[in-house]
Image (cartoon, helix red, strand yellow):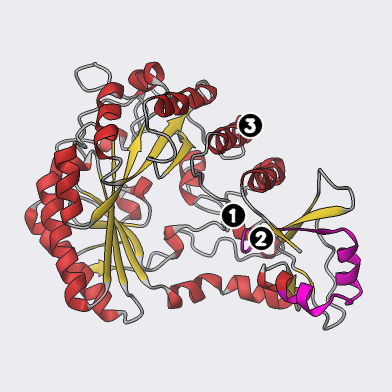
Amino acid sequence: MDWPPSDSSNQMMLSRYCKIYPDRKDPDSVVLLSTRQASIATVPRALLEDIKNNTLNEDDRTTLADLGLLAESHEDETLEMAGLWDELNSMNYVFKSYVAMNLDCNLACKYCFEGLRKGKFYMSRETADAFVGFVEKKVSANKTLNEIHIVYYGGEPLLSTELILHMSGGLKALAKSLGIEYSASIITNGTLLTQKTAEKLRTVGIMDASVTLDGPKKIHDSYRPLKSGRGSFDRIVRNLKEVCDMLDVQIGGNYTQDNYRQFPLLLDYLIKEGLGPDRIADARFDFVTNESEGYGPPDFHDGTFSINDPWLFDAVLYLRGEISKRGYKRVNLAPWSCMMELRDRMVVNYNGDIYKCPSLIGREEFKVGNILSGVKDYSKSHNLNNWKNEKCLDCVYLPLCFGGCRYMKLVRDGNMEGVDCKKPYLDAVLEKLVLQDIKYAAQMKI
């Protein structure tokens, strides 16, 4: 249930962005979730009356307020949420960019996210140097920035290993000269991530790698074969054993409705092979999204167009629980953060073109600039502030949604107009996600 709005006095009240769930173990307690801060507290049911009657003791009031569960007024909360992204942009300390080193690959994945945009397209050394210059201008112009973080991806980025080493070395030196931090990671299919390559990456500040394994061997090899047709699973696992103590490795994977229940077999296999939670930084599995006609593989339609597909309700809960059960770190419940809303988050294509979402690369109408010309205003083309309407601002789920995914709205409906409301999904899964967090992690009790 949601707490009914009541702004008739100056007392502290439950936040409009607070969900109340029954405590399954204690009928005299309830579980409170702040969707603003993703904080969880189990409290006596009687405490709700204390909040309503303004009879909370000072310690409880302070604790609940710090957790984002109390507010002085719902009107002030609404104003705060409406200005949230402006505030976050003004306080941002990190310049972050995804850089597509190429659009080539040594795999032939059935569902390839870049689909028909793939080809022998590689970033040149001149573009790499221009990107370093672009970052220098951005950071020098914004004195609040104290860190540069780059995510190298592709295509398969390790087909451009030497250029990555050149670029990352340049950015690392730049950060040092400016007196700020530099960090970097790589998203790779793992087939080329050998021990020798990992050693080179470490020397230029690349310490994290996300490696894709789409389930156990049989499923993975059917979805992610080498271009020759041979499976890639064994090679990737062999490489993981060599590098997971040198880099922080995240296991990622992409599932469909037909195969997601097989993914725990992958985790069991990894544990058996000595790649358990003590050697793997974390694990996460994501559903495959279908692409628009003319962009994605023409013969693949097994993904989804909406997070509100009912089969996803079970898939998300099931896989998150199976990851936690085996002791792997998993993605925590957190407020929604879309890079489209963040000024210093961007995607740079191999040719220097700039986009605001990795999935939009190659869509000319959504290009927001170039590293030579800078970034133009994209508020209308990307339908920013689509959630600034009465219905969304009043919704308890707003901090977990902010209008949903504009990209999924685009591939499903052909445009980004309106919102991609996540309410059906959150109605179905949020309480169970909270219960998982309580089961597998310590929660605040007062």
Q: Is residue 144 above or below residue 127?
A: below
Badge 1 or badge 3: first in the primary sequence: 3
Mark identifier at residue 248: none
Q: Which residue is mark 2?
A: 392
In percent of width and height, residue 324 lies at 56, 39
**Residue depicted at x 21% and y 37%:** 193
Image quarter in which the C terminus is found: bottom right
Front position among marks 2 and 1: 1
Q: Quadrant of residue 379?
A: bottom left
Q: Is residue 41 above or below residue 201?
A: below
Badge 3 or badge 2: first in the primary sequence: 3
**Residue depicted at x 34% and y 28%:** 297
Q: Which residue is mark 1?
A: 401
Give the magenta range: 33-62
In the rendered structure, the answer to whether residue 24 lies left or right of residue 417 reads right
Looking at the image, how many numbered discs can be counted on the residues? 3
In percent of width and height, residue 91 lies at 44, 77
The amino acid on which the numbered mark 1 sits, given as a three-letter code, is: Cys
Helix, strand or loop at mark 2: helix
The amino acid on which the numbered mark 3 sits, given as a three-letter code, is: Asp
In the rendered structure, the answer to whether residue 142 lies left or right of residue 194 reads right
Mark 2 touches mark 1? (CB < 8 Å): yes
Q: CA distance from mark 1 to mark 3?
A: 19 Å
Q: CA distance from mark 3 to mark 2?
A: 25 Å
Front position among marks 1 and 3: 3
Q: Which residue is mark 3?
A: 314
